[in-house]
Image (cartoon, helix red, strand yellow):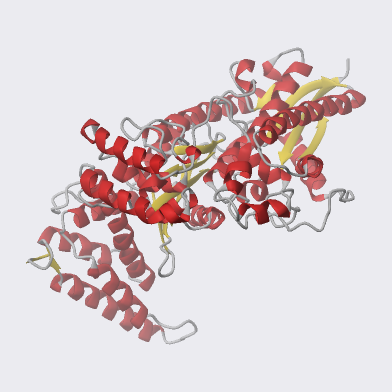
Amino acid sequence: MGQDYLIIFHIGPVQDFIATARRSRDLWFGSWLLSELAKKAALEVVHQNGGRPESLVFPAPKDPAELQPGTPFNVPNRIVAVVKRTPDGLVELAEEVWRAVFAHLNKLCDGAFAEIKGEFDRTAAWRQVEDFLEFFWAAHPLGDNYEKTRALVEALLNTRKATHDFAPVCWESEAPKCSLDGCRESVIPERAYRQSTKKENELHTKYGVRPGERLCGVCLLKRHGQRGKEERFFSTSHVAALPLLERLTEKHRPLVEAYITKLKELDIMRDALGTVGESHPVFERHDGYLLFSERLHEYLPENRLPQAKETLRHFLKQAFGGKEPLPYYVLLLADGDHLGRVIDAQKTPGAHRALSRAQSIFAQEARDIVREHRGSLIYSGGDDVLALVPLHKVLACARCLAETFRRRLANFKADDGRTSPTLSAGIVIAHHLDPLADALELARATEKAAKSVSGKNALAVTLSKRSGAARTVKGAWGTLDRWLEWFTDLHRAEAIPDAAAYELRDLARMLAVPDGVPDEGLKARLQEAARLEAIRILRRKKAKRGAEPIAKPVLEELEKRLAEGEFSFEKLNQLADELVIAHEFAVAMDLAGERMLATSNGEVRPK
């Protein structure tokens, strides 16, 4: 009969695989693919254990049907289960799980490769896909101490993951490297790129690539893979255009139809017109990149571009009074705080299973929250969320996620009996044409900044504009978000001039004490001088486009903040950067016609 074993499976790779994304579709499908394979592994564990879902500890779905392919249930890349087996039976179980995962990968790969209209090296592509997948497992008899056993199995699994397999590469060639991962060879023949110069957009039609973009088999899978009925993803350009699209009403329908009709007459590519997974009430399934003149060249012949740009200019003038979409979107990355400590405090598989179920429920709630805020969810695995969100909705979206996570897991405590999981979020405001991989890297750094806040339950926001260095601010939920909302309203009401932030930042840079200066008295005098000068700058600045002084209640609130605690140049920089970032929120909210977030006359304080 055997004995009870705790077994943990790992499906990967994770970070490197997800990060190799040039388009939001690559990121969207790559994240889903790993979840889908992990879900298949969990389903096979249930199947191999008599269909009993209680064999799973993490994830812990209420119904095994949630683990069926194509369901919206997300599964992290680590599966924890309790099974009754002999040692040989454990090996057989792992082999069955591996076969199920591999068969599902093959099925998804078949579907993706069938979508490719051009010739490519299918054999090499298959080998690359087979070679990329990681599958590790570790197990140990359960015994009487679940906490100790789980820690031991985790250590065994980490040791196994650190033991690299050096299998011979059997698909190497002299072909150029893949443009996304840089390590595997492209499987698209070079003659396809030479021939494409004779016919506009042939590469995009046949392979879904741009001139100069080479893809390996794994990246072709991400580019062409299908998520079944869940075909809902937004391009970064579409997310950037959403504040402007919010203004479209039924009265604009004739203008939209006329614009799209004209693009068709100019021979725009068919798949450029209907790629968004969720239909807009007026703009329908057309991607928002049709509102950016700099993107039209990707889908139109060169000789038709001047006409297309003039048609777009005319449409924007008639529909929006000449307003253009903002070029910025938001990548939101959130992760649970203290979850490791809380998991360690679960002393039985049943307690751990209850925590897992609460995480699974939050993952489903996160999907709805992102959708309600006009965003596109890329991944939600129970304690982490990755999403594309429009600029005018992201603060409310991130706060709703954090509050929902905290409430959902409030009953689970660490060993101190007080600490419950919270959610920290990193928000990156990025240009829609910048490399997505760069935005992802910046999002991870921003999330790390949020995690560095004492006690966590924090927010960090990075503004990455094409001109100038990135600006990052961080603080606890309930503090930083309220200040940003208040500053946003001040900008919208023209109650504070834009130039104030830049003068404060210049002040901090001019008076900052260089590292290594031992004179503490000098530091203190310079800091006090900077604080007084910051107050003087704010008092002499004019609001309402220079027509009147900044309102007294607003000045009092800002001066109070500068006086709170020990003054530092870091505090002054943070205040300046919050004002600059809030200006971007204000522009997006004005464009979308959003209501004010809080009163901006100083009567209601930001905290």
Determine whether 294 is above or below 110 in the image. below
Q: Is residue 370 left or right of residue 525?
A: right
**Is residue 431 visible to the viewer in this orientation of the structure?**
no
**Is residue 551 visible to the viewer in this orientation of the structure?**
yes
Residue 591 spot, x, y in % from top left: 25, 48
Residue 197 spot, x, y in % from top left: 60, 56
Farthest-out residue, right: 88
Q: Residue visible at 30% across and 38% down?
A: 258
Q: Is residue 398 left or right of residue 199?
A: left
Nearer the observer, 174 or 54: 174
Nearer the observer, 272 or 440: 272
Residue 407 placement: quadrant: top left
Determine whether 416 is above or below 37 in the image. below
Residue 464 placement: quadrant: bottom left
Q: Residue visible at 79% across and 46% down?
A: 161
Nearer the observer, 128 or 439: 128
Residue 78 spot, x, y in % from top left: 69, 35
